[in-house]
Image (cartoon, grey):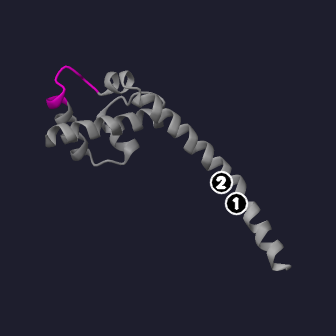
């Protein structure tokens, strides 16, 4: 049970990494760099994934078939859009603060 949970968590994080890169990571090392994951942890998680799903080389097929990859890509796009909106709103906060000082 614990191995399966670890394997599924790895698959979910792999989907997030794919969304960040806009492609599948080329290696577990690249996955670690993008996800800021300790290398040893990532390799343990990959081992659990391969143990739980021996016919899969990476989680890519599973996350595509379930729609998880597309959902993460959409969430990532929305977060990027939100970041752009927040950056544009920051100067407005100062304007609002100045306006209230006049009251």
Residue at image position (52%, 34%) is 74
What residue does disc 1 label? 90
Residue 51 counted in the magenta span: yes
> 97 above or below 72?
below
What residue does disc 2 label? 86
Magenta span of residues: 50-58
Count neighbours of disc 1 (C-alpha within 10 A) and say few if under 14, some if 14 to 19, many if 20 or more. Answer: few
Q: Secondary structure at mark 1?
A: helix
Residue at image position (21%, 41%) is 6
* Pointer 2 with pointer 1, Cβ within 8 A: yes
Q: Is residue 40 left or right of residue 82?
A: left
Task: Measuring from the top left, give residue 84's x and y in whole percent.
Answer: 65, 47
> 85 above or below 59?
below
Q: Is residue 27 left or right of residue 46?
A: right
Q: Secondary structure at mark 2?
A: helix
- Measure how far apart labels 2 and 1 are at the Cα level: 6 Å
Q: Is residue 72 left or right of residue 3?
A: right
Task: Measuring from the top left, give residue 3's x and y in whole percent.
Answer: 15, 39
- Quarter of the image with the N terminus in it: top left
Residue at image position (47%, 37%) is 20
């Amino acid at each position: 049970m614990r191995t399966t949970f670890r394997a599924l968590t790895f698959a979910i994080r792999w989907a997030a990494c794919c969304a960040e890169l806009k492609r599948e990571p080329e290696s577990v090392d690249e996955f670690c760099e993008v996800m800021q994951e300790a290398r040893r942890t990532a390799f343990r998680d990959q081992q659990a994934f391969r143990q739980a799903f021996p016919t899969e080389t990476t989680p890519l097929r599973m996350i595509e078939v379930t729609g998880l990859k597309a959902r993460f890509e959409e969430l990532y796009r929305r977060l990027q859009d939100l970041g752009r909106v927040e950056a544009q709103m920051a100067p407005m906060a100062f304007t609002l603060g100045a306006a209230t000082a006049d009251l």
